[in-house]
Image (spheres, rainbow, N blue to C red):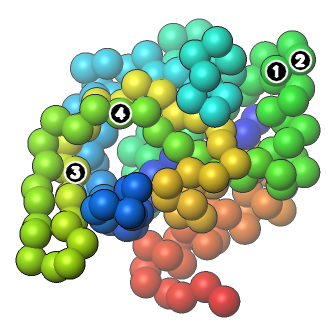
Amino acid sequence: MADISGYAIQWNQPAVIGGLFEERFAKGAFDKSLVDRPDVVALWGHDSTRPLGRVSNGSLRVLSDSVGLWYSLKPNDGPLGQEAIATVGSGTVNEVSVGFSSQVEEWDDREDVPRRLITQATLFELSLVLWGAYGKATSAAIAGTRHSQLAKMEAAMRARGIPLK
């Protein structure tokens, strides 16, 4: 079965959370967590009854790099894995969300919308979702397809401040 890969988070990309505040992750925010609590799981839509993979069985890899939190998922051959491959492969589902707990954060209340920069967080899971808080700053694509190559190129452009059309 094919792999699904992309970025679960890109460093310093903003997301407005519930219309209440802007949130960003600092580069390396999950580094300590990936060492201390490496058994991250991949879920379908944050649903713990619909697991897609996990680090401990080798079906999920999660790495912190210069762009963000990169992952590669090899779903099982069961119906849920097939559904994930089909919906991501068609481009229907192409975003990711993360389940985490903020450990160290900095707040800036000088603007109308408060800003939170998370500098250290514990990562529990990443989920394939239709609409994630970080939107197109995340990606889910079949590895080796044009979609994943395009996602990598767009991530590199965003990281360098190059606007996308």
Residue ID at (19%, 67%): 114
Image disc number at residue 80:
1
**What's the mark number on residue 118?**
3
In the figure, 159 relative to 81: above or below?
Answer: below
**Nearer the N terminus, badge 4 or badge 3?**
4
Residue to which mark 2 is pinned? 79
Q: Are marks 1 and 2 in contact (CB under 8 Å)?
A: yes
Residue 142 x/y as whole percent:
79, 46
Judged from the image, the secondary structure of the residue bearing numbered disc 4 is strand
Residue 37 visible from this viewpoint: yes
Q: CA distance from mark 4 to mark 2?
A: 27 Å
Tell me which numbered mark, 4 or 2, is placed earlier along the sequence: 2
The answer to which of 101 and 139 lies nearer the viewer is: 101
Disc assigned to residue 154: none
* Residue, disc 4: 100
Sequence-wise, the earlier of marks 3 and 2 is 2
Q: Is residue 58 visible?
A: no
Amino acid type, mark 4? Phe
Mark 1 and 4 residues: CB-CB less than 8 Å, in contact?
no
Distance between the alpha carbons at the discs numbered 3 and 2: 36 Å
Q: CA distance from mark 1 to mark 2?
A: 4 Å
Q: CA distance from mark 4 to mark 3?
A: 11 Å
1 or 4: tag closer to the N-terminus: 1
Look at label 3 and name its amino acid. Ile
The residue that appears at 30% across and 39% down in the rendered structure is 30
Q: Amino acid at mark 2?
A: Pro
Q: Where does the image place residue 131, in percent across and percent down from the top left? A: 63, 52
* Residue at 90% across, 51% down: 90
